[in-house]
Amino acid sequence: MSKIAAVILAAGKGTRMKSSLHKVLHPIAGKPMLDHLMASVAALEPARQVVVVGSGREQLEAALGDRALTCLQEPQLGTGHAVQQAEDALAGFEGDVLVLYGDVPFVRPETMQRMLDRLHAPDAPAVVVLAFAPEDTLQYGRVIADETGRILKMVEHKDASEEERQCRLCNSGLMAARAADLFGLLARVGNDNAQGEYYLVDVVNVANADGRHSAVVVTDDPDEVQGINSRGELAQAEARWQHQKRESMMAGGVSLTAPETVFFSHDTEIDADVTVEPHVVFGSGVSVASGARIRAFSHLEGATVGEGCEVGPYARLRPGSVMERGSKVGNFVEMKKTTLGAGAKANHLTYLGDAEVGAGANIGAGTITCNYDGYFKYRTVIGERAFIGSNSALIAPVTIGADAIVAAGSAVSRDVGPGDLRMVRGEQIVKPGWADRFHDTMKKKKAAEKK
């Protein structure tokens, strides 16, 4: 098998996004669109990856780190010129090159492999072009091919005749070629066209002029080659991704009572026999085990939910939240960097931050762990089967022992031993008849003001 290199074009300014963030770094399902594409490329185990950068190069270089080489296209003189900039980065490389686009993030590994397989078919085409047949051909360039899939001509929409525009086979821009062929052909591409640019598609026409042929591969899913150039197209891509993820989840045994209202992250993991109620949002880093129920209007991010747990409604699990088997958080409960032990409960109006709650403990309504002094964070440890009364403030660092009870309304700043009761309240003062006298006085005063 030939080695593979990927050249990903990402030099465009992305002006239609109207954003200071580089276009290909805009997220879909919580992951930059460029990373969606690179994940698909990774399935082919490429020997080299080169990203062609231009405007916003600093953002891209920071986001890529050492995952890919970068090369600069400046000035930007068309797609053919962009690919030429990768020639030095691929010096000495003798394998196959896939030309991809950073704003076309959902090309499947299987489709890329079909292109490479066609490149090595017995008729040995010089170039393989990925095409699609949309309902509306819009301004796409056309692929003019015969019935065997050999390409007769590639033409941009601006340069196409009316007859050529009747062709429904459109160019996705994605190509595969051997490295030696690709850069040799690119060196001979001119810019005598309506835009005065060096078009990548012209490598096919140059090969045809040499008496060589190129071939087309047609995707059966036009959505996988849809480019993203605006906020509207970004929203459409998100909607398509979410729809596919919901279908995949339900096919895997997850119950979504109102699928269209549930939103997943790129890495959400949910086991079979989990029920997700309406209007739930999963941020990145969430896993949910079998038998759990995520109730309506809850938000989870960076959280692990164990078997048989219940979350919400209106709960928020922030990064570092761990719910062990059978534990429960109810309405308006927030957790952050907290482990809730097996069978433990925090049913209402509670904040648990930087805490460890033992198995079987009960956290009363309105309880908070006071974990931050304005400078540093501190931990709260609550033992197994401890009972924390309603409206309590646990001032960290503090430890509540196993089977201990904290009385309602307590502000606890010192450790409580196992099995102890801690009550921290101000003395209650009773003044008999005071309220009656107060009401009488105020009623007389109000009546006097009306006269």
Image (tube, grey):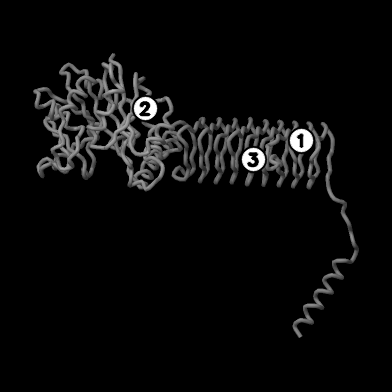
Task: Inspect the image, locate mark 3, and give the three-letter code of the amino acid beneath it.
Answer: Val
List the residue tagged with mark 3: 329
Q: CA distance from mark 1 to mark 2?
A: 48 Å
Residue at the front extreme of this rendering: 75
Secondary structure under the numbered disc 2 in the rendered image = helix
Q: CA distance from mark 3 to mark 2?
A: 37 Å
Residue at 47 percent of width and 38 percent of height: 264
Task: Inspect the image, locate mark 2, and give the three-letter code of the amino acid beneath it.
Answer: Ser
Task: Look at the numbered discs 3 and 2 and tell me whether their residues touch, using CB distance below 8 Å.
Answer: no
Which is nearer the eye, 358 or 96?
96
List the residue tagged with mark 2: 40
Choose the circle earlier in sequence order: 1 or 3. 3
- From the viewer's perspective, is 111 left or right of 267? left
Instruction: Where is residue 345? Give x, y as percent.
Output: 68, 38
Q: Quadrant of the N terminus?
A: top left
Select label 1 or label 3 by which is in front: 1
Instruction: Where is residue 451? Give x, y as percent.
Output: 76, 85
List the residue tagged with mark 1: 398
